[in-house]
Image (tube, rainbow, N blue to C red):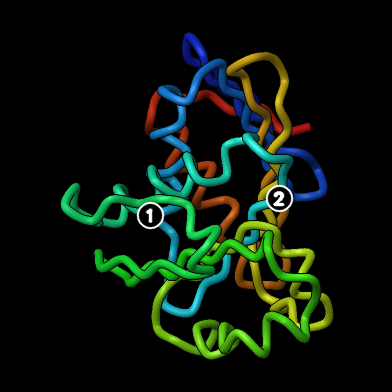
Amino acid sequence: MTAQTNRLTAVQREDGALVVTCRTPEDLPPLADALAAVLEPGDTLLLQGELGAGKTTLTQLLAHALGVGVEQYVASPSFALLHEYIGRLPVFHMDLYRLSDEDDVEAAGLLEYFEQQGVCVVEWPDRLGSLTPDSRLDIHIEQEQLEARRFILTPRGDAWQQRMARIAEHCSRSRLCWEQR
């Protein structure tokens, strides 16, 4: 399905992935709202993209959509490795950029958060290596132009495969029209 507002386009591919393109960061709230609507305790979102791609911006919007108040400023945990925010679901925002590999992730004590009843949002997830959860939503962010971004949401595991339709449905209620490809 393809949906388009003035600045946001979404396409659901035959393989189940959802591709959302936006012209500016201000166009992202419908995507964050759609994700927040389907998130459950214990979920993991892996954000991949170059520096400045929009990983933290998406996390900020997602946290807001999950009810994290403005008094909890959502910032990149690059130096702290982890920031925790309280909303409808706890948000465990990890930035693994400064770590080398799965041994560093384990030594930092971050694995325990994947067992918590919150949502793990992980930037630079390649550092997880073999510790990467099987059930997850991979979100690859590509810079199209100065502000434009493409978000490729790829479900991993049965639970996420089933939820992709709910994400598409939620977005369609946000004035997005869909066309399968």
Residue receiving disc 2: 48
| As drawn, 99 above or below 10 | below
Closer to the chain start, of discs 1 and 2, is: 1
Residue receiving disc 1: 37
| As drawn, 143 above or below 126 | above
Q: Amino acid at mark 2?
A: Gln
Q: Is 89 displayed left or right of 175 in the figure?
A: left
Q: Is 181 displayed left or right of 12 in the figure?
A: right
Query: What residue is drawn where x is 61% and y is 71%?
Result: 159
Are circles 1 and 2 on residues that touch, CB within 8 Å? Answer: no
| As drawn, 129 above or below 36 | below
> Residue 135 at what x, y percent from top left?
67, 75
46 or 124, which lies in front?
A: 124
> Residue 52 at what x, y percent from top left?
62, 35
Q: Is 56 displayed left or right of 50 in the figure?
A: left
Q: Which quadrant, please, contains the N terminus?
A: top right
> Residue 92 at what x, y percent from top left?
44, 70
Q: Amino acid at mark 1?
A: Ala
> Which circle marks residue 120 in the picture?
none
Farthest front residue? 79
